[in-house]
């Protein structure tokens, strides 16, 4: 955003914070992998991951104080989704949580993003539910809980933690009501979720407890998308203009995460190209929403060559052995990297060019960003 005359530019902007929190995300993945035999690495992953999550409050505060930008509105939800990718892929790969559950979570993320692009191209606006707004933080809180299980040896420490999770939101809700006479309904939902997890944990089956936690996250993630999938689809189908570009986006929304986690579990290829594909595809989905809003989204061929091409390469990598699997996974990462880079370059005028920074464009970007954050 261009500062107005007489307005002092802040030393730290919201965009700086957003880009700064992207930088340590690969380290979180690395530390989770290293943590299989080294608890110090897991502690590092937990501490740095918590700091990354907290910076979301900081860039939000700075954006409200100094004004939002189109770039910031685009990058903030992208950073959240990329962080989730860097955390949950190692969880699935190391066996902390079931890979199929993580894949199902990302199918929802891609599918709703694809639907949003279709809606934006047709000026369809959907009301966001409260649960949709809480979905991202549920996923982020799940990262901390999952990491703490092996750190606390699945024992009494986790029991105490769950009691904090039960009582903490209720105390916070009571304080909020006493001070501002405002009811926080999410507190009761959070407490109920931790009650369920505690009861399962007390059975003593640690693997089942972790799977149960992941199952809750997946359920909340999918339920939060009901408004988009059910309500929005009805409007989209009623228009009668569903086209090939929409079909390719929605097909890749299912095929891509399935191929990613098939390659992760079945292939001897290293994890880094697989994580690269997932993170970059999540990032370009946010850009596609913005370009769809401006009627500049790429067509079926461009989207399909990149997304379905990378999916095919990963799918074959899951079926072959040896060095061939590694090269196929690297080829998939290269396909995604080139395709996503082209998309960001092609769409640069819609998030960094001066002619887009006027008030009307900022308002448009704010509307798209607000909707994306609530996915």
Image (cartoon, rainbow, N blue to C red):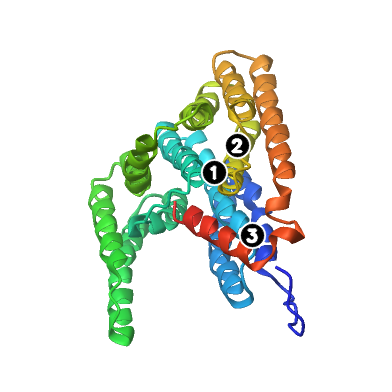
Label 1 or label 3, whichever comes before in sequence order: 3
Q: Mark 2 packing: few (<14 Cα in 10 Å), some, or many (20+)?
A: many
The residue pinned by badge 3 equals 70
Q: Position of residue 1 (x, y in %)?
A: 70, 68
Q: Residue at x 28, y 52 (%)?
A: 197
Q: Would you say the residues marked 2 and 3 are in contact, meaning their CB atoms lie under 8 Å apart?
A: no
* Image position of 246 with respect to 34: above or below: above
Q: Is residue 93 above or below residue 140?
A: above
The circle on residue 85 is: 1
Label 2–label 1 contact, CB within 8 A: yes
In the rendered image, residue 372, in percent from the top left (x then y), is placed at: 50, 53
Which tag is nearer the camera, tag 1 or tag 3?
A: 3
Instruction: Say which mark, if any, is on residue 292.
Output: none
**Mark 2 or 3: the one toward you:** 3
Where 199 sits versus 170, above or below? Answer: above
Distance from Cα at disc 1 to Cα at disc 3: 23 Å
Distance from label 2 to label 3 (Cα)? 27 Å
Which residue is found at the position 33% from the left and 84% from the top?
180
User: x, y percentage for residue 248?
Assistant: 52, 27
In the rendered structure, find residue 275 and report the number of the disc placed on it.
2
Disc 2 is placed on an element classified as helix
Which quadrant of the figure has residue 309?
top right
Q: Between marks 2 and 1, how big is the CA–CA gap?
A: 7 Å
Please indicate, yes or no, whether residue 40 appears anywhere in the rendered image. Answer: no
Classed neighbour count for the residue bearing mark 1: other residues with Cα under 10 Å, few (<14), some (14–19), many (≥20): many
Earlier sequence position, callout 2 versus callout 3: 3
Q: Secondary structure at mark 3?
A: helix
């Amino acid at each position: 955003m261009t500062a107005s005359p007489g307005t002092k530019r802040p030393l730290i902007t919201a965009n700086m914070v957003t880009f700064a929190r992207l930088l340590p995300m690969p380290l979180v993945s690395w530390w989770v992998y290293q943590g299989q035999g080294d608890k110090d690495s897991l502690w590092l992953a937990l501490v740095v991951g918590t700091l990354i999550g907290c910076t979301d409050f900081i860039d939000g505060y700075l954006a409200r104080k100094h004004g939002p930008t189109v770039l910031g509105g685009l990058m903030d939800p992208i950073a959240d989704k990329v962080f989730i990718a860097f955390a949950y892929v190692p969880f699935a790969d190391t066996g902390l949580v079931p890979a199929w559950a993580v894949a199902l979570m990302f199918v929802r993320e891609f599918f709703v993003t694809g639907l949003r692009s279709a809606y934006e191209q047709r000026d369809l606006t959907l009301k966001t539910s409260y649960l949709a707004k809480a979905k991202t933080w549920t996923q982020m809180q799940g990262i901390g809980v999952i990491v703490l299980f092996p750190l606390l040896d699945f024992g009494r420490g986790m029991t105490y933690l769950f009691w904090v999770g039960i009582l903490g939101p209720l105390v916070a809700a009571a304080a909020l009501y006493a001070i501002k006479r405002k009811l926080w309904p999410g507190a009761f939902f959070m407490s109920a979720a931790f009650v369920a997890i505690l009861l399962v944990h007390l059975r003593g089956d640690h693997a089942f407890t972790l799977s149960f936690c992941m199952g809750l996250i997946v359920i909340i993630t999918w339920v939060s998308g009901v408004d988009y999938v059910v309500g929005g689809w009805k409007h989209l189908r009623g228009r009668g203009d569903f086209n090939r570009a929409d079909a390719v986006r929605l097909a890749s929304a299912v095929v891509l995460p399935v191929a990613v986690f098939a390659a992760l579990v079945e292939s001897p290829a290293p994890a880094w190209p697989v994580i690269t594909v997932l993170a970059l595809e999540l990032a370009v989905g946010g850009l596609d929403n913005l370009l769809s809003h401006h009627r500049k989204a790429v067509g079926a061929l461009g989207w399909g060559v990149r997304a379905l091409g990378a999916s095919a390469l990963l799918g074959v990598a899951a079926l072959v052995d040896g060095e061939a699997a590694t090269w196929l996974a690297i080829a998939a990462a290269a396909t995604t990297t080139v395709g996503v880079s082209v998309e960001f370059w092609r769409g640069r005028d819609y998030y960094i060019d001066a002619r887009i920074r006027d008030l009307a464009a900022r308002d448009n970007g704010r509307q798209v960003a607000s909707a994306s954050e609530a996915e």
